[in-house]
Amino acid sequence: MSIDFTESEIKTIQSAVDHRWRKEKIEVNLADIEITKEGEDEPTLAPAVVWEDQNSTFIILKMGAFSYKNFFYYLTDQRFDTGVPEYNDLYECADKLLKAQADFMLSKHTKGLDLHIQK
């Protein structure tokens, strides 16, 4: 049985998105995504919050009451995540996802430059 996102959780994610795209309005949307959990054979539906920018689709899954997983797709076929299996802080989950995508885009557009990213 899945646990849906609360209105407060949706507002938390929307706040992180609004902070990233200050000059344009990016709306977050609710979805159900079929996943197969580790150690299980059958797929299940997990509630998700999804949004898109020009080249990326962002997804935050709600795995449990205070358990979230994040990843993004670049150009629909390249999947990336933050390297953290699950978060228990939703704002951190959204923030780290946005930073991972920003770092990816920065590295993609600065190849060949002597650039050092400060974390």
Image (cartoon, rainbow, N blue to C red):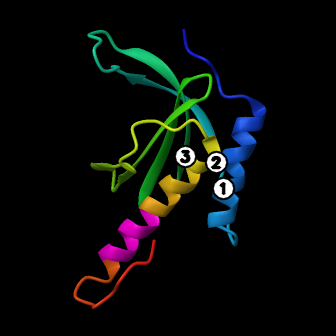
Q: In this view, does 3 lie above or below 67?
A: above
| Residue at image location 46% in from the left, 36% down from the top | 86
Q: Using the rendered image of the protein, determine whether residue 25 is visible from the camera's viewpoint.
A: no
Please provide percent x and percent y for residue 64: 56, 22
Residue identified by numbered label 1? 16
Amino acid marked by disc 1: Ala
Answer left or right for 38 relative to 94. left
Amino acid at pointer 2: Tyr
- Mark 3 surroundings within 10 Å by alpha-carbon count, few (fewer than 14), some (14 through 19), many (20 or more): many
- Identified at 27% across, 90% down, the residue is 113
Residue at the extreme bottom: 114
Q: Kindly identify the residue that appears in the image at 38 percent across and 70 percent down.
A: 105
- Displayed quadrant of residue 9: top right
Q: Magenta: predominant secondary structure element? A: helix
Residue 19 lies in the magenta-colored region: no
Q: What element carries label 2?
A: helix
Nearer the observer, 26 or 92: 92
Residue range (magenta): 101-108
Q: Mark 2 points at which residue?
A: 91
Q: Which of marks 2 and 1 is in front?
A: 2
Disc 3 and disc 2: Cα gap in Å?
5 Å
Q: How far apart are marks 2 and 1 (CA)?
A: 7 Å
Specify few, some or many for label 2: CA neighbours under 10 Å numbering under 14, 14-19, or 20 or more. Answer: some
Tag 1 secondary structure = helix
Image coordinates for residue 36, horizontal then vertical, percent: 33, 20
Q: Do the residues labelled 3 and 1 touch (CB within 8 Å)?
A: no
Q: Do the residues labelled 3 and 2 touch (CB within 8 Å)?
A: yes
For the residues labelled 2 and 1, say whether their Cβ atoms are less than 8 Å apart. yes
